[in-house]
Amino acid sequence: ETTQDDAAAIVGDACQRRLARAGRPARLAAAFAPLADTWAVPALAKRRPNRRLRCVAQGEPSDVTMLAQDYAAYVRRNADAEPLMVIDDRVPQDGTCDAYPAVAPIVAGDHLAELARREVEPAAAADLRRERKYVLWGGARAGSRWHVDPYGTDAWNALLAGRKRWAFYPPGATPPGVDIVPRLVSASRTLWTTAPAAADWFARDHPGAQIVTQEAGDVVYIPAGWWHATLCETACVAITQNVIFAHNARAAHALMARSKPSLARELAALVRRRRADD
């Protein structure tokens, strides 16, 4: 379901609005058709073998830098209890770059996308380059520990290669078997890195959690405030996009005001302009 403005997006405006009203995680099966040979980890590494990638293990407070070709070799042979994942925020928020093939935006027309096209304060522009969209690489058993996305944003995740498991838990309570690590609570107050590691948690029973398996071409929607964790069953590449629409703009503004005041001011000004136009 698309509107004219969102024709290039994977998920259309009507679908986005319907899922936002429901306020629950959802998987859209076969929403698009990625080319597996194009988006697999070895293919991306071959495309730009010397590209430096930021690799993280969520139980550690520091990152590791690795060349793409070395990360592909690591994925083939690693046996780590919690394998490193790539979180690449050096991607164009709209359009493509030589490091990645072309892919449509998951959803179009959110407030962050609109701000990125406007002339905004330099600090807000820097935040927008890092806070909106990421390409994620992970080998088998890599994943993200239980967390809540920052700044009251909704999130969309399109799987380009591989198979991934998700677990969801509603806002307002801590998922079963999870401990918050106080030293890693971020300034946004809504993003926590937690124990146990993803592979360890998924190996247990999951009372009360919603479990979803995502295949390549599926899109997963995560409403603001929902806990979620992921585990790559095979090597995976995904693109994830955080968005702010009318339904979560007020909460996002309140959270951004604490640690990203410039972006919060630009968001408030955009909402005021939209209301005046309406």
Image: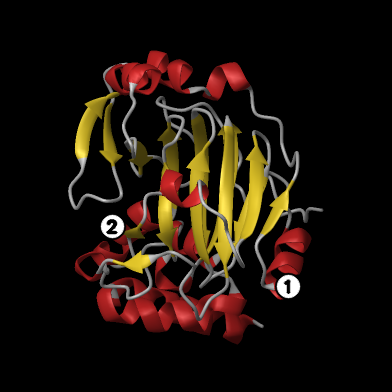
Label 2 is placed on what type of residue?
Ala
Picture mark count: 2
Relative to 158, residue 252 above or below: below
Label ID, residue 126: 2
Label 1 is placed on what type of residue?
Ala
Is residue 269 at least partly visible in the picture?
A: no
Q: Give the camera-side residue of 34 and 273.
A: 34
- Residue at the location (37% across, 62% down)? 119
Q: Give the camera-side residue of 175 and 172.
A: 175
In the rendering, at what x and y percent does residue 232 appear? 50, 37
Q: Residues within 10 Å of mark 1 (few under 14, many from 20)?
A: few
Label ID, residue 22: 1
Relative to 273, residue 34 above or below: above
Relative to 189, residue 6 above or below: above
Relative to 112, residue 171 above or below: below
| Picture quadrant where residue 104 is located | top right
